[in-house]
Image (spheres, rainbow, N blue to C red):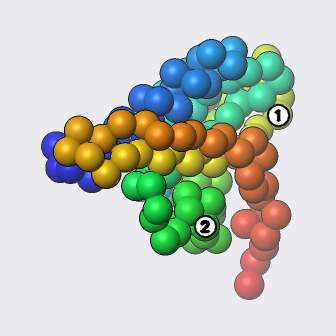
Amino acid sequence: MSDRQEKGKLGEDAICAELEKKGHSILARNYHKRVGEIDIISTIEPYIVFTEVKTRKLGAMVSGLEAVNNTKRKKIVLTADAYLTENHDLLIKYPFVRYDIAEVWITCATKPLIARINIVENAFDTEGIYTVN
């Protein structure tokens, strides 16, 4: 596993733990489809939550929120659609969909440590994703 992958996993592990503390049930991690990937899929009534995790070193020039641009958002939404198509029965118990972005800041030490996390609920929606140009 590369250094970047290890830091990403560290961030995702921290966010999963935080989501579980908040009452989420984790359904999937690193869900892949041809169009993209979703880091964490969870449920908390009444939502199915698709969370993009961005892990950054303290002092990074670009925040996790800034890193999730329109192209990335579109990939997340289309991948979420694929997941919902495969698991449409979930929509009976969890009729609403939410897109969150989680930021994780780590120390720059040899063995990185979590310095701070921030979970932005409803960070974006599907507006503009399904328009035909």
Q: Quadrant of the N terminus?
A: top left
- Out of 59 and 47, give the one closest to the viewer: 59
Which tag, 2 or 1, sits closer to the chain's start?
2
State which quadrant residue 23 falls in. Answer: top right
Q: Residue at x 80, y 19 (%)?
A: 45
Residue bearing the label numbered 1: 96
Between marks 2 and 1 in the image, the one whose residue lies nearer the viewer = 2
For badge 2, the amino acid type reads Glu
Q: Is residue 1 left or right of residue 133?
A: left
| In the depicted structure, whether residue 3 falls above or below residue 132 | above
In what element is the residue under mark 1?
Answer: strand
For badge 1, the amino acid type reads Phe
State which quadrant residue 90 falls in. Answer: top right
- Out of 91 and 107, give the one closest to the viewer: 107
Residue furthest to the left in view is 1
Q: Quadrant of the C terminus?
A: bottom right
Residue bearing the label numbered 2: 66
Q: Position of residue 101 (x, y in %)?
A: 63, 48
- The local crowd at label 1, few if under 14, some if 14 to 19, many if 20 or more residues have their Cα within 10 Å, is some
Residue furthest to the bottom in view is 133
